[in-house]
């Protein structure tokens, strides 16, 4: 793993809170001048630590009131079956998350957001169950969101020791 110092961690924490923050605001917030701050952000992007920046939307204000967690079992565990399934669900905008899982009787878990139960039924019957290899489907529905964050934990990262080399040690 690329070693991150405290300034890198503060940059990442700030960007997770507000990806639209300007470089000037970010630099002020973490205690750097703008040029070194911009260089660090660019280094974090080039290292692949910052993948992209997005805008989070309010689902209920967009009439996406039903969230379903769907566990899906496949009839065969072959690379071809998995590829067919993954390619199909990648094309459905209702699927906001797709996980290949273990420790359950299911192979995949999908998080799907739709306006209502009628829409969900159409989606399930006309899309999910028609994917080649899908053998079993179990749906659960979200009653209330307790925690929903896109922020990754950063406290476990230990900065490099003084005198050691760090990719981002120069300000």
Image (spheres, helix red, strand yellow):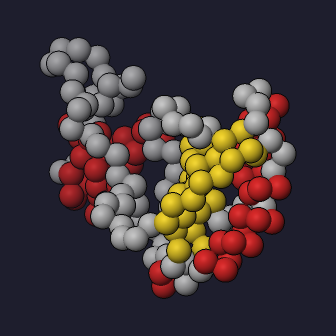
Name the image quarter holding residue 118. bottom right
Quadrant of the image containing the N terminus: top left
Q: Residue at x 23, y 14 (%)?
A: 164
User: In the figure, 125 relative to 33: above or below?
Assistant: below
User: In the figure, 108 relative to 140: above or below?
Assistant: above
Residue 143 or 153: which is nearer the viewer?
A: 143
Residue 136 or 52: which is nearer the viewer?
A: 136
Q: Is residue 35 visible?
A: no
Residue 91 spot, x, y in % from top left:
76, 57
Residue 147 spot, x, y in % from top left:
31, 60
Residue 36 spot, x, y in % from top left:
32, 44
Name the image quarter holding residue 169. top left
Residue 156 or 39: which is nearer the viewer?
A: 156
User: In the figure, 144 relative to 16: above or below?
Assistant: below
Q: Residue at x 51, y 61 (%)?
A: 140
Q: Residue at x 48, y 85 (%)?
A: 61
- Count all numbered tags in the image, as a single digit: 0
Q: Is residue 147 visible?
A: yes
């Amino acid at each position: 793993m690329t070693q991150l110092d405290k300034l890198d961690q503060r940059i990442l924490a700030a960007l997770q809170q507000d990806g639209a923050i300007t470089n000037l605001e970010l630099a002020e917030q973490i205690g750097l001048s703008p040029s070194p701050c911009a260089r660090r952000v660019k280094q974090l992007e080039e290292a692949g630590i910052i993948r992209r920046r997005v805008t989070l939307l309010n689902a209920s204000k967009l009439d996406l009131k039903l969230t379903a967690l769907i566990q899906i079992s496949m009839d065969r565990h072959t690379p071809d079956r998995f590829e067919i399934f993954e390619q199909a669900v990648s094309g459905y905008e209702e699927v906001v998350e797709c996980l290949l899982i273990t420790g359950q009787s299911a192979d995949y878990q999908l998080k799907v957001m739709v306006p209502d139960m009628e829409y969900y039924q159409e989606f399930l019957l006309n899309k999910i169950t028609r994917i080649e290899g899908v053998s079993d489907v179990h749906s659960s529905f979200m009653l209330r969101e307790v925690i929903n964050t896109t922020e990754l934990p950063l406290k476990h990262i230990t900065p490099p020791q003084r005198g050691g080399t760090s990719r981002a040690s120069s300000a």
